Image (cartoon, rainbow, N blue to C red):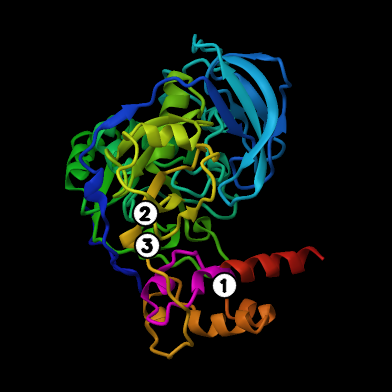
Amino acid sequence: MSEKPRKFKGGVHPNDSKALSAHKAIQEAPLYGTYKVIMHQNIGAPPELLVKKGDAVKKGSLLCKASGFVSVPLHAPTSGTVKMIDKVPGPTGISVPCIVIEADGEDEWGCPFEPIADWQKTDPAELKQRVWDAGIVGMGGAGFPAHVKLSPPEDKPVDKLILNGAECEPYLTADHRLMLEQAEEVVLGAAILARILGLETAVIGVEDNKPDAIQALEKVAGKYNIEVVSLPVNYPQGAEKQLIYAITGREVPVGKLPSDVGCVVQNVASAVAVAEAVVKGIPSIERITTVTGKPLNDPGNWKLRIGTPIDEVLKLTGGIKEQPAKLLLGGPMMGIAQSSLDVTVMKNTSGVLLIAKDEVSLYTSEPCIRCGRCVDCCPMQILPATISQAVENNRFDWAERLNVMACIECGSCSYSCPSHRPLNQQFKRAKVEIRAGLRK
């Protein structure tokens, strides 16, 4: 390692509960009879629908095309017939359009991509176009189009590519197993991403509670001049701005992007998707997802195709041994509680988590006691307690002046609040109100 990683301000140390699935090798889910592929799986503009009821599709066929620069195409997870264009609950609970594909059982490829074996000699612009055409987004949870991050403004030169292998969210082990079992692909993806950005090297940041993954990456990293950095455990280490600071010491100002400090961050799963798109010609139609929680008989990590119904995913674990209190998509800190099993796997579904009844409690939110714990743990160095008061008084203008838009919704403030104040939820509401006000 070239220099010692830095500790960012704030953060918390929740019980990681990763032991439930960290030792479970990745398994591939069987082919299902029906896939319900949510159309809008990226931050930015929804893609444009290209198929209709009755159309035959092959695995990898284009279902939707990008509708703008901040948009990505969508591909079929298997071969079959488009049964209907329907709606299913999205991860936020709102009904969203989906393409229902009835599988024919053949799982026949119809991929339009030719592998690029000599990627080291290929024009970086062609490689970036492949990333876009393959529909790759940030697979750590954000869903931001990968090709957009690879297109920094000309007046903001990038000199550092960082791969996020921190996986700091409790319970989740999908990236851990990916780095351990597919270290070659992670490093290859890093090298391709570096070439697109015109860089000679890249850094992979991994929290030191994954020593086997660090060792696996270090064995192959030298092949492409990639550096692996072991980071101390501190949630939210995997947040983009915190990861940049830990590795480079550069602070991304409020309202600015990583490219403003010469950095680009991509998730390790996105890097593997890039490697497969370039070298194998495979579009983004599947991902590794942790399916875990005390109520499950056999938690683990599965390779799931987009559009897989969550009720089928839960059956992979042998079902439940006790009635759960909550179902979350993602982890307990940033995941979203679900009210229906009709939700389906998306490109950014990093985890499916069942919380046991003895892990949750009902409580009444109390007035702020001004203990300052939320301020101490906030990694963005804003004032959660004060912003909370602004939101409670519907003073969204005040909340905006207090930089609520800088909040990364990591939940550290809510986790540490002894008065059980719904700080994170209030900040999410404030952002919605502020954005709605800007549209008027």
155 in relation to 361, above or below: above
Q: Quadrant of residue 234?
A: bottom left
Mark 2 — residue?
355
Q: What stretch of residues is rendered in magenta?
A: 405-427
**In this rendering, which labeled residue sits more in front, label 3 or label 1?**
1
Mark 2 or mark 3: whose residue is earlier in sequence: 3
**In this rendering, which labeled residue sits more in front, label 1 or label 2?**
2
**CA–CA distance between discs 3 and 1?**
19 Å
Mark 1 or mark 2: whose residue is earlier in sequence: 2
Q: Which mark is residue 426?
A: 1
Pick whichever, 33 or 398, lies toward us: 33
User: Can residue 224 be found in the magenta stretch?
Assistant: no
User: What residue is rendered at 35% in x and 31% in y?
Assistant: 316
Q: Quick one: SS at disc 3?
A: loop
Q: Which mark is residue 48?
A: none
Measuring from the top left, give residue 166's x and y in whole percent: 32, 52
Q: Quick one: SS at disc 2?
A: strand
Q: Quadrant of residue 41?
A: top right
322 in relation to 67, above or below: below
Tag 3: Cα neighbours inside 10 Å, few (<14), some, or many (≥20)?
many
